[in-house]
Each structure stands twice: as C-alpha cells, then as structure tokens.
Amino acid sequence: MGLIIVFLLAVLVAISLYSYLRVFYECIRKVKITKSNVKLTGNSSNGTAIQIADASSDTADQVEVFDQAPGPLPWPVLGNLALLGQYAVPFEGFTDLAKKFGDVYTLTLGTTRCLIVNNLELIREVLNQNGKFFGGRPDFLRFHKLFGGDRNNSLALCDWSSLQQKRRNLARKHCSPRDASSFFHKMSDVGCFEMQEFMEHLEKNIVSGEELEIKPLIQQTCANMFSQYMCTTRFDYNDTEFCKIVEYFDEIFWEINQGYAVDFLPWLAPFYKNHMSRIVHWSSTIRTFILERIINERERNIDVDEPEKDFTDALLKSLVEDEDVSRDTIIFMLEDFVGGHSAIGNLVMLALAYIVRNPEIGIQIQQEIDRITEKKRSVNLQDIENMAYTVATIYEVLRYSSSPIVPHVATEDVAIAGYGVTKGTVVFINNYELNTSEKYWENPKEFNPARFIEKNGTIKKNIPHFLPFSIGKRTCIGQNLVRGFGFIMLANLLQKYDVSCKNLDTIKTYPACVAVPPNAFKLVLSPRQL
Ligand code: HEM
C-alpha cells in the first residue's frame, strides 16, 4: 500500500514538473514567423526581430525570430494569477503591471499564455492591422455550458470562421440600424410603445415614497423592445414564463461579466459543478422558450417570397436559402440577439445609479428633455441629435464600466510591436486603461458627462481612445441598439420620474463592469410635476 502511494505521488510530481517545464518553455521560447504573418507598424521596427533565410524552403521564404513580450515568470500551478488576485478589479492589475513591464507584456494565468495590450496605438495594431490573426476567443468551460455544449454556437464567444462572417452579415442590417434608416424609425416606434407600457405598469406598482425593485421591470421592458423589434412579438408582464427567462438572461449577463479561477484552472471544474448546472439550466430554459414561443409559430407561417419583415424572417429565409445555415444556427442567433436586451437594462440601471449619486446630472437631463419636448410629448429617437447631455451620460457610464471581459485569442504565431505572440495566447485589450488614464482624460475619476460635449453643445464624435464597443472585425454588432433603446428608456423614465434612494450605501456598482447583480439596488421613483 505504502509503495503504491509513493509511486502515485512520484507520478503526480513528475506530471506537475513536466507541465511546469512546458509552461516555462512556452514563456521563454522564441517565436518564428514567416514574413507574410507580420504586418509591421511603427512599433514593430523597434523589435528584436532577426532576419534569417529559411534554408529548408525552395522559395527561400523569409522567417523572422522574435522574443516574446516581457512579463513576470510564472509560478507552478497558478502561473501569475496570484499577482492579479491582489487587485479588487483585475484590470487595475493590468494597468499597474504596465508600469513595470511596459505597454505590452505577457502573463501566464494558470497555464494559459496571455498578452496584455495597454495603449491605443498597440490596440489598433492588434485589432485593426492584424485582426485576422486574433479572431479566436478563449476556450472557457463556462462559455461551452452557456451555448449547448459548444461555444461556437455563440456569436460573441465563438472563434472566427466563415460561418461567423455569414452570421455577422445576416445580423448587420437588422441589428445595427443606421441613423435615419427605416430600421432606425422602427427602433424608435418600438422603444416608445414599450415605454408607454412600462409607464402604465409602473404607475400601478409604485407606492409613494417607497423603494421599488425596478430592475426586473426595466429588464422585461428591454426584452419586449428586442422581441418586438426582432421577432414582431411581445409578452405580457404577467406572463410567468417570459418573466422567468428575462431573469435567466440577466443571470447570464452577470455571469459573462465575471471572471472565475476555473476559467484558467480547468481542473477546478468539479468544485464548480453546481454553478455549471445552473448555467446549463438557465440557457436551456431560454432556448426552449425561444423555440416554442417564437420560432415554431413563425416557421409555420413563413412565406419566403414575401419581403422580410424582421430579423426572424431574415433568419428563417437564410435557413431555406443557405445550406451552411442550420436550424440550430438560427435558434442560437435569435437567443443571442434577443439576450442583448440584458446589456441595455443593466446599462440603464448603472445610469440611474450614477444619477442618484449625482442628482445634478439627473436635473440637467430633465432640463434637456423639457426643452426639447416642451413638456408636451414623450421623447423619441429623432430627438437624440438634440439631446447631447443625455447621450453623454450614457457614454460616461460606458467609460466608467466597459472592460476587456471578452478577450481575443491569437489563432497562429504572430508578431505585435516587435514581440512574438504564440498561437493560443489570450489577448486582453485593456480598454480599462484607455478609459481611466490621465493620458486620455482630464480628471478621469470624476463622473462627468460634460467631457463628451463639444463647446458648441453637440456630442463629441469619434473620440479615438473611447472604444467601449471595441474595433476591428469582431466589434460589437449591437452598439446602435444600445445607443437607441438605452436613450429612449433613460430619457422617458427621467421625463416622468425623479429618481432617488433611501440609503446611498445600497447603490453598489462595480468598476469596469457593465453589469449590476441580478438582485440589484432598489430605487424611489417620484412622479415629476409636469
Ligand atoms: C452595454 C452594452 C454593450 C457593450 C458595452 C458591448 C461591448 C462589446 C464588446 C467590447 C464586444 C467585443 C468586441 C471585440 O471582441 O473586439 C462586443 C461583442 C459583441 N456584442 Fe456587444 N456590447 C453591448 C451590447 C450588445 C448588444 C445589445 C448586442 C446585441 C443585440 C451585442 C452584440 C454583440 C455581439 C454579437 C458581439 C460579438 C461580435 C463578434 O465577436 O464577432 N452587444 N460587445
């Protein structure tokens, strides 16, 4: 018995040692890249590349050899995870470590090589100039659990592929409505209609001066905006199945915005069994709802010769017209896009939190609303051009909250800023640094929407270092929906209500996080005298 234990221990030590040596080798190894894989930019020419000729090749292809970016040496098992564990917000750690290692550096999290990119020029080099080498996503267990066992079913968590290009093209027309297009007007009509429903429901539920749990209602309204816009169907606020899936979408949104040790230490999975089961339960319940309450009926009545009336029609038509598109593809796509509503509900909750903390911001928004509507009508999307302060408040919330929570992955060996990056490296685009650095913003710690407003009172456009929706081939597809529906909801809510709370300590927000917990803070909504 004793011998067996000693033997097993020896095997364990040997495996651990072998695994650590591999990690160590991955850290120090040089990266060889054929010339075509390097799109050199300003920085790259300063790198450590040594030009050699590949003698084995008939065509004498040029191969360059690169050192990897600097970074701390990893510890066995944890790698450099303990370094980030010291920070309340891991992205603060990213920024802090840049002071020691420079604007681009490497970390090993568990056994995974990571590259942290900390300035605008380098971010562009990764996402714009070299985007085709960074189209992958990390292979976290949680991501698979969320999408029927395969993260490639998801639009945001899949690796780049021709199917992904197709899905993005399919979604673009409906889910990225351009200003003044017919889709933009539809977004406005749908948003305004749902806000009327919201107001009616709210009036019935408000008790004067009492705190109200407002997040579920906000989420249900956003869900109906999305479902009406994309599927031409909406649900009653008393529909328990609908309320349940809205709650589950919110749980999933919170979940996606968290980082867990198991992401980088997959051997911890047995300890996360219950958590993973919950994720599977949320997502499979949602899928059943989307199928039974939306897709099945639409599929029965589809006429492919009629012009498509919404995103669901476009998806069903592609099922008939394109052999690469399967029924699963469209079910997962619809689930993904309808689920986008959760991001907007959370964003509005965050905006309300900042307004409660800074009441003068709410007053300025209300003055803007009253000036534009002359207190005679509700706010619609055509007003957005003239309501810079409201839009600026949404932007300031995004500046405060967005983070590199969905990283990229290098799909082959490549060079960035003159450093070699190995295939499989997880790349964090540190937009937390872009959003909080004094290099880019005056008083970055202050919540101040006015920073987004030009001297002439219009909204600042194209601020190069403000990238809440990222750039490049995997940029966010839902950003116009965020701006449009987020604006309609925030403006119409503040037109009718003053928002406050009984105890400011209950208003909890998390830095660099666009989500608030599912059981978020309560608010007091007091009807305004109009
Ligand atoms: C607060 C609101 C939102 C923020 C801050 C946000 C931000 C982002 C960011 C940073 C990415 C990653 C881009 C990259 O990898 O470089 C992303 C991807 C994505 N977003 Fe959003 N997003 C929001 C809301 C939405 C909504 C409402 C939808 C859909 C209706 C949506 C759909 C997507 C999709 C499909 C992707 C994946 C694109 C791809 O990987 O090819 N997002 N978003």
Image: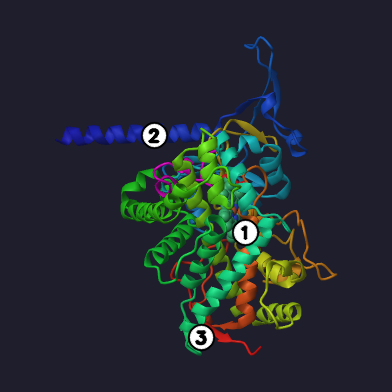
The residues tagged by marks 1 and 2 sit, at their Cα atoms, a distance apart of 50 Å
Q: Which residue is nearer to you in this view: 44 or 394?
A: 394
- Mark before the other along the chain sequence, 1 or 2: 2
Colour basis:
rainbow
Residue position marked by numbered label 1 in the rendering: 481
CA gap between label 3 and label 2 equals: 56 Å
Q: Residues within 10 Å of mark 1 (few under 14, many from 20)?
A: many
**Mark 3 or mark 1, earlier in chain:** 1
Q: Quadrant of the N terminus?
A: top left
Front residue of 365/90: it is: 365
Q: Which residue is mark 2?
A: 17
Residue type, mark 2 in image: Leu
Q: Is residue 153 magenta?
A: yes
Residue extending farthest to the top is 58
Q: Name the residue tied to disc 3.
A: 502
Q: Where is residue 514 shown, x and y percent of the image?
A: 56, 62
**Residue 340 occupies which quadrant of the picture?**
bottom right
Please report contact status of discs 1 and 2: CB closer than 8 Å, yes or no. Answer: no
At label 3, the amino acid type is Lys
- How many discs mark residues in the rendered view? 3
Q: Secondary structure at mark 2?
A: helix
**The residue stretch that appears in magenta:** 143-159
